[in-house]
Amino acid sequence: MTITQITAEDIPVLLAGAQLLCSSAGSIALDGYRTAIEEVLRRNGPVPLVALDDLPPDALCVSIGALGGFAPMIELPPNGDEGVLAVRALEERLGRKVDAIVSLNSAGPNAIFPVASAAALGLPLVDCDGMGRVLPLMIQTTYALAGLPIGPLAGVGLAGDVLVLDSSEHRSELLLRAAMKAAGGWLLCASYPATVAALRPAALRGATSRALTVGRMLTTADDREALLTGLTRIMGSRVLGSGRVIELGHATRTVGPRIYPSVPTSIVVGEYGSAGRLIRLEGHSELLLAVIDGAVAAAVPDVLCLLDRHELKVVGMETVGLGHHVDVLVLPVSPMWHTPAGLAMAGPRAFGFPVRHPREEDA
């Protein structure tokens, strides 16, 4: 079924699907903000969800996404006008109007910020994004892989501070993170301004509709096998193993500088049965690496996540506990991420794990 619009009733569904792509990074319970978005959609009407090829080649698109952690967003929730302020500031800098909104990524809270911005601005949302999952840096995108500049960009904080920035990718990331800390822990950014023609080779298409489809499965699931079959059909997922969490601790030591804003974590799942394998999951804010009996079984940029076998919901790293019964899933991402350039940007070695991605080993 082709999804052509996003309604107020779709927001909880979208959040459920977006949770799966967080790689068990944590809860995204922004209940107050979610309610506000639903009210805007009921008042202004649904947001049109359009395919990239349905827009003129010269239409200007801008990516909406938040920079910062989930916890600050819960403690200092958005006011609702950040997206409008960011886009208007960017339009003033560019000297032209924005024609459509795209997603920085369709995972976690970043799945609904573009919807809220499109609803408030009266613009369509393009069914694509630039990550296909959660990644910690704004410069870790397929937009950047394709050579699109991140700026000029605009960031807006909780107090309404507006920052307009035009710098290189890495300088932009550094400057934005300094501003984010001063702003209270997060910024909503309008970045990667690009025409449809420039986005076509860079964007991951169908990202929002995929999150909606998966979210509908997760919110209605009452049968584990049916859910796993559906995830395989829609996402290409596979189960690495199933068992009980038997150990929680600090992550394995990585190499190189600690450049990511995250908390290292290690989770060990003991597979069912007397001869069950040990699945060790290593992560920072999200799961990044799965090692089974000493061999790398899956790694970032593919999505690793934990699914509660009984409640049939994604288990966040902040809530997983000893004795938790889980399925360990891996969801493959776009082939764009499996290129040498993609793995250099977001593969295991980019996060300090001195190992090769399984696809590199296969090659």
Image (spheres, helix red, strand yellow):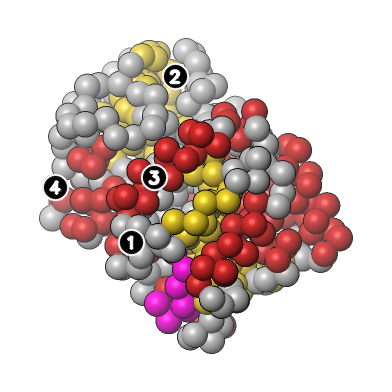
* 20, 86: nearer the viewer: 86
Q: CA distance from mark 1 to mark 2?
A: 39 Å
Q: CA distance from mark 4 to mark 2?
A: 29 Å
Tell me if 340 is positioned left or right of 302 in this view.
left
Q: Which residue is mark 3?
A: 175
Mark 3 or mark 1: name the one nearer the start of the chain: 1
- Which is closer to the viewer, label 4 or label 3? 3
> Does 71 lie within the magenta span?
no
> Does 194 lie within the magenta span?
yes
**Residue, x 21% and y 58% (percent of image)?**
341
Q: Which residue is mark 4?
A: 361
* 58, 356: nearer the viewer: 58
Label placed on residue 144: 1
Instruction: Give the residues in magenta.
Output: 192-198
The quarter of the image holding the N terminus is: bottom right
Q: Secondary structure at mark 1?
A: helix
**Circle 4: is it few (<14), some (14-19), or many (20+) Cα within 10 Å?**
few
Mark 1 or mark 2: name the one nearer the start of the chain: 1
Mark 2 or mark 3: name the one nearer the start of the chain: 3
Q: Which residue is mark 2?
A: 244
- Which is closer to the viewer, label 3 or label 1? 3
Q: Image height check: is 229 above or below 243?
A: below
Q: Amino acid at mark 1?
A: Ala
Residue 22 in percent (x, y) is at 48, 41
Q: Amino acid at mark 4?
A: Glu
**Residue, x 31% and y 68% (percent of image)?**
146
Q: Secondary structure at mark 2?
A: strand
Q: Amino acid at mark 3?
A: Leu
Tell me if 316 is positioned left or right of 354 in this view.
right
Mark 4 or mark 2: name the one nearer the start of the chain: 2
Q: Amino acid at mark 2?
A: Arg
- Which is closer to the viewer, label 4 or label 2? 4
